Structures are given as structure tokens and as C-alpha cells.
Amino acid sequence: MLSTDSLHLEAQIRQIGSEIVSCQRDCDGISRNQAKGILPRCLVLEIEGRDEHKGLVIVGINPARPKSGAKSRERKFYREHGGTYEQVVEYWRTRIKPKHRYYSPLRKFADLLCADGQILWTELVKCENAPKNKGEPPIQTLRTCIQTYLQEELKVAPDDWLLLAIGRNTFERMALLCPHRTVIGIPHPASFGHFSHVCSRATKRFKGMWDGPRGVAIWLDDYFSGRSR
């Protein structure tokens, strides 16, 4: 049975998630069309199988555009089931979580950090890129989505939860956004072996990050190489 604190956190995240999937902003550089099953998404509090202590917030840039077959299945699922936040979480739990090449390796890495508690999965921007946008979302889109949603999520996530930022740009933004929280940056799992190289050097000694000074920002590649960080 979940504690009162966990139930309260879950309710707060559900409220923010419901606001996200119904967002009607037409920001530059992104795709959003709820009627076609193209939803703002990727805010999930993972509780199942996780301990109720020392949680972790894992932050990426924005949702990847699903590949053709997966895209059709996911969008059809949302169209047929109403596109609610509960359906977004259900699709993630049953179709994405078990074997996704983003979530699975990052979950394993979290365990290396001794972060076997709950995980709040989120993104700087909650919408996938528009088809013609091959880079990051525009700066104004980042500003709007971070201010509207991510900052609200961070207000409800416990202060002692680590922030794990995926990719150098995400790390730098989170380090500036959250100067009083510990931010750890690692390469994206799809970064041509760079992620695997960093993970291979990670050990349980990172447990000290829980008990060390708060408010540090560490890009792990620099940490291992001894470069300034």
C-alpha cells in the first residue's frame, strides 16, 4: 500500500498530466493534434516495483516521434480511448515501459545510482517535433513549456530527489533552472555508444551523491575524465 505522501504526489502529477494532454497551445516547431492522437505526453510517475524512498526525476528534451508502425498504433490507441492522461499512462505502462530503448537503460542507470525509488519521467517540452523540425524545439517553445508545466512538476517532486538530465543541453538547462537541487547529466541512450561508455564506469560509489552537498551539477563524462565540472 502506498504511503500518504506517495498518494498525494501521484494525485498532483495526475492533475498536471491532465492539463498537459489537453493543452491547446500552438507552439512553434512541434506537432499537436489531439483529434488525430498526437498528444502532449511523457509525464509519468513510475511507482510499480519501486521503493518509496529517494526518488529520481529523469528529464529529456521532448518526446521522440514514434516510428511509422508504432506511431500508427499509439495514435490509434489514443483516438479510440479518448486521449486522456490515464490512457497515456496506460499505454506507457503496457506498450512502452517493458522494452523501450530509452526507458530501460535509464532505469538500469538509476539503479546504479542507488536510486531504486520512484521515478518521475518528464521532458522539457511535452510535444514531439514537427516533421520538418530535425533539431530541438525552438527556444520560445522551451521557455513556454518549462514555465507552464516542468516548473510545476518540480514544485511537487520532493526536494531530496535527484535530477537526472539526459543530454548535454538538457543538463545545462536543468542546472541553471534548479540551482538548489543536485543535477546529474548523462548522454542520451542513443548517443552511439557514449551512454554505454559512461554507464560502464558507473558504480555503487555514486551512493554518496545522496548524502553529499545539495545543489551540485555534475556532467558525468567530465566527472570521470577529471575535467572541470
Image (tube, rainbow, N blue to C red):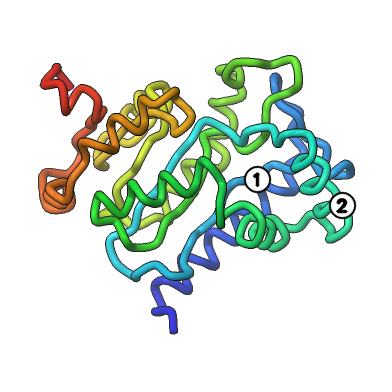
Which residue is label 1 attached to?
41
Where residue 106 appears, as percent x and y from the top left, is 41, 45
State the quadrant of the C terminus: top left
Towards the viewer: 227 or 59: 227
- Residue 113 coordinates in the image, percent (x, y): 25, 50
Among all residues in the image, which is located at the extreme bottom? Answer: 1
Determine which of the numbered discs, if any, sits on residue 74 in the image.
Answer: none
Q: What SS does tag 1 mark?
A: loop
Q: Residue at x 54, y 26 (%)?
A: 143
- The residue under label 1 is which amino acid type? Arg
Residue 79: which disc? 2
Q: Amino acid at mark 2?
A: Arg
Residue that appears at 47% across and 49% down: 104
Q: In the rendering, at what x and y percent does residue 208 appear? A: 11, 49
Neighbor class of circle 1 (other Cα within 10 Å; few <14, some 14-19, many 20+) is many
Quadrant of residue 137 within the rendered picture: top right
Could you give the CA–CA distance between mark 2 and mark 1, rounded to whole angstroms? 14 Å
Residue at left offset 51%, top offset 66%:
10
Horizontally, residue 60 falls left or right of residue 81, namely left
Q: Position of residue 223 (x, y in %)?
A: 17, 27
Of residues 2 and 156, the one nearer the viewer is: 2
